[in-house]
Each structure stands twice: as C-alpha cells, then as structure tokens.
Image (cartoon, rainbow, N blue to C red):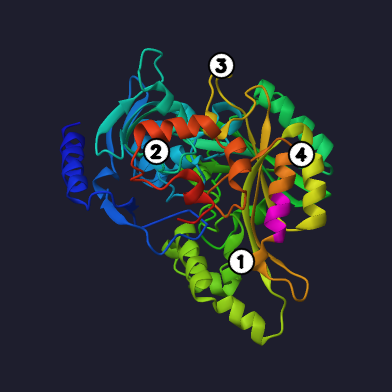
C-alpha cells in the first residue's frame, strides 16, 4: 500500500494548490455518462495515479483498488488469482469508483446486488481536501457517508481507494438461452431463479435477458464451471460473430469467464449497428481493437456535440429524433405494465432486462433506495425515437413520459443519462433531507457540484 499512500499525499498537495473555492471535477480520459455538462466545469483534478489495483488478498478474497481503475483492468488483475468482483458492469471502461458512486448492474445482480454492496471500506476525498476512511461499521462516526455515497455522483467526494469483496472465478461459463413468449412467464421465471439460484435442476450464477419483441424474450442463464468437454470450443464474439444475434439462434453456448464478462462490450450491446460495425464487410475492415464500447461512445459524443446526424436528417427531410438512453429499475410485479407502456410510447428493440435484488435486506442505501424485499428488473434501452412533424427533441417528451411511468410504478431511474425532474420530486426520489445533511457536513462550501445540479441541472 506504499504506492497508494504516496499517491494520496501527492493528490492532497495538488488539491491544495487549486484556486480556493473553485468547483472541482476529475480529469479522466473516458466516461460512460450520457448527459451534457456545463461549459464552466471548474478546476480539474488529475487522479490518474488511482487507476490501479494496489493489492489482492487471495486468502481473504478482497482487493484494494484505486477508484479510477476500470473494470477491464480490475478483472485482468483478479482473474489470474482465480477471483473476480462480485458484480462486473458490462462495459470495460466503467471505473470501480464510478460504478459505486453512480451505481452499476450486471447479470450477477440477482444474487450479489450492485457494486457498492461488496465494498468493505473506502477512502474518500472530501471538499476540504481531507481524505476520510469510511466503513459500514456501527461504531464508525462516518457510517452515514459510507451508505450515502452510492448514487451521489461525486457530489459528496471522490473514492480514491476501495476495498472490495471478490468471489471465485472458474475458467468457463456455460450458458442457456431460455425463450419466453410473454412477460408473465418471463417474470415468473425471474422470481423463481432469484429465490433459488436454480433453473431446471442446474445452478444459476448469472442471469440477464434480451427482449426482441413482445412475443420473443430470452433469459440467458450462466453457470460457472472449472472445465468443459475437451471437444467444445468456447465461442468468440470479438470477431465476425455478434453476441446478441446468437441468442435466438442458440439454446446453449460456452464462453471463457473473461469473454463472458465482456460479452456486451464488443458491440456496446447492439448499439454498434448505428455505425455500420455489424455489417459483415464493414466489420471485416473495422480493426478488432477498436470494436469496443468506449470507441462508440466517443463517436456518439462527437455526433451529439457537432450535430452531424441532425444535419443529415434535416437535409433528407427526415423527422427530428429524441435520444432515449436510459436504465430504469422496475419492480418485477410491474414489469408487464411498464413494457406495455414502453411498446406503445417508445417502441425500441432490443432492450436489456437484468434482474436485481439487494444482497442484505437489513441495510439502507438512502440515495437510491429500493425495497430490499423486492426483486427489480433493470430495463435498459439506448437509442433515439423519430418524433412527429414539428416536435422538437429538446422538449424531451418521451423521456419525461418514461420518468413519470417509472415513478408511478415505484421504480427508480439511473442518473447517468438525461433527467428532467423538478427539484422537489428529485429530492423525494433521491435522498432528500438525508442528502442535504451529508452535503452540509462533508462539503459545506460546495467544492463539488450538488447532486441535482450535476444530474439534472447539467452543471
């Protein structure tokens, strides 16, 4: 940990050298946010020294990790030890600190919850420049900050070091793609598997779903195994084959654990089709090392900044479009109602379905509070929708309808993308008085932008 301590001390000196009172943001090369930022972002803090795994305790199955470490690098460090994080968000460039302060989800979330639920302690850089170690221990005077940090999006501080739980990572994942023709049977299966971790007599370690239409959905069930039939060659979806297209065609599949964890990254789920990367000829000449989510994200970011697509659509007489890029958590009992609304008002496909249940029902995470007894399904949809003539995407009509429906169904919406709540409704949904008390105590001079300003006000 000597390396970490030296990096922490250098960062504190750098922090003290910044203009007093100026807002602070991190300087980072990648992002997975899909909301605009203010042009006046304040002072940038270089945290590149915290993009490493500092240590791995194989016996205790824990790791001390820099907050800026990407999951790609984290997995690369833990797999050689036969270990992996309990929840690995599906894109390689998501950072551990980002997944904890901004939430993350993946196909182990039905049994392991979200990334913040496997954190044992954190070192947080506060607005004062102090670095504070926080834990969930009842005698920790800063316990409230530990539980209030998830979903705070850097508005309470930044995680420099996190000690996280790991779990065993056998070499392969055997997969089953189970087809469902209606939401009711799909929901029933999700509830059963979440409760038992078993389907049709086999253990289930991973579960997520892909919905191609109202009549065609699949649950992909994964089982970790140490070995496979020597005659079986694991699939590879980093070349010409495309993972999501294999789901309707194959009832079973096998991937290495490494490739399973990144099965969605190569084509950014299915979003790479917008760039032609799924066309066989284009794909053949698109360099393999550039088939990854962060490349597509940069292309989208540039397009939204310079308006290339908007100009082309206008020249061709096409209707204006509204970006609809969201992940929402819906109680499983309300999944059918939400999807019926979604088909009528949005109509995008495919969409991602990822079950989620809190690991420890006795804990409370106040800034993104879910009913710990309830199974939720994350519904992910990432595209744009053509609007009626004369309607502007700036009005965000469809996104506002989605927000209202999610609230009506007692769900929650992730804040990595655009949000349109007014301040009172936002406070009711995302921490309210608890957040204000934490903000007043740990960042009283607002060196970090507030949560509402950062996620809705675009600061």
Is 167 placed above or below 233 here?
above
- Lateral position of residue 214 relative to residue 47, left or right: right
- Quickly name the residue at label 2: 156
- Quickly name the residue at label 4: 335
Is 113 placed above or below 459 here?
above
Q: Pointer 3 and pointer 2: residues touching (CB < 8 Å)?
A: no
Q: Gap in Å between the C-alphas at discs 3 and 2?
A: 24 Å
Counting from the top left corner in percent of width and height, residue 167 is at 44, 26
- Quickly name the residue at label 1: 273
Q: Gap in Å between the C-alphas at discs 3 and 1?
A: 43 Å
- Lateral position of residue 352 relative to residue 120, left or right: right
Look at the image and say whether residue 283 sits in the magenta stretch: no
Counting from the top left corner in percent of width and height, residue 357 is at 62, 28
Magenta segment, which residues? 397-402
Task: Between label 3 and label 2, give the one nearer the viewer.
Answer: 2
Q: Which of 371/433 is in front?
A: 433
């Amino acid at each position: 940990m000597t390396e970490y301590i030296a990096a922490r001390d250098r960062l504190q000196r750098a922090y003290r050298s910044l203009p007093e009172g100026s807002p602070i943001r991190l300087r980072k090369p990648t992002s997975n946010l899909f909301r605009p930022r203010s042009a006046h972002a304040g002072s940038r803090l270089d945290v590149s020294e915290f993009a490493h795994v500092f240590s791995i305790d194989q016996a205790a199955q824990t790791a001390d990790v820099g907050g800026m470490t990407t999951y790609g690098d984290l997995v690369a460090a833990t797999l050689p030890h036969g270990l992996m994080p309990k929840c690995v968000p599906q894109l390689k460039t998501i950072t551990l600190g980002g997944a904890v302060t901004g939430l993350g989800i993946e196909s182990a979330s039905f049994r392991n919850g979200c990334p913040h639920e496997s954190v044992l302690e954190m070192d947080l850089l506060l607005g004062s420049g102090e670095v504070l170690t926080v834990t969930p221990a009842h005698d920790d005077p800063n316990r409230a900050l530990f539980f209030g940090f998830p979903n705070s999006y850097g508005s309470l501080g930044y995680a420099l070091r996190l000690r996280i739980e790991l779990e065993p990572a056998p070499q392969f994942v055997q997969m089953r793609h189970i087809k469902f023709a209606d939401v009711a049977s799909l929901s029933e299966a999700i509830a059963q598997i979440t409760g038992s971790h078993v389907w049709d007599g086999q253990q289930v370690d991973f579960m997520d779903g892909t919905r191609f239409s109202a009549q065609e959905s699949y649950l992909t069930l994964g089982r970790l195994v140490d070995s496979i039939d020597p005659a079986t060659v694991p699939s590879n979806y980093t070349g010409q084959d495309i993972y999501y297209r294999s789901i309707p065609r194959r009832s079973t599949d096998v991937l290495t654990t490494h490739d399973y964890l990144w099965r969605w990254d190569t084509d950014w789920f299915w979003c790479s089709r917008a760039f032609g990367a799924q066309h066989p000829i284009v794909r053949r000449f698109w360099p393999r090392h550039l088939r990854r989510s962060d490349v597509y994200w940069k292309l989208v970011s540039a397009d939204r900044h310079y308006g290339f697509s908007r100009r082309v659509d206008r020249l061709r007489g096409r209707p204006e479009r509204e970006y609809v890029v969201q992940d929402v958590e819906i109680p499983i009992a309300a999944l059918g109602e939400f999807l019926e609304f979604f088909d009528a008002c949005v109509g995008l496909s495919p969409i991602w379905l990822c079950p989620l249940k809190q690991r420890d029902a006795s804990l409370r995470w106040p800034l993104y509070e879910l009913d710990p007894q309830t199974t939720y399904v994350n519904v992910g949809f990432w595209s744009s929708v053509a609007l009626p003539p004369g309607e502007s995407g700036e009005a965000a009509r469809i996104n506002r309808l989605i927000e209202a429906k999610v609230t009506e169904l007692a769900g929650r919406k992730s804040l990595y993308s655009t949000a349109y709540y007014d301040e009172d409704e936002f406070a009711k949904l995302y921490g309210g008085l608890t957040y204000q008390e934490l903000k007043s105590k740990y960042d009283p001079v607002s060196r970090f932008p507030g949560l509402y300003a950062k996620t809705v006000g675009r600061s």
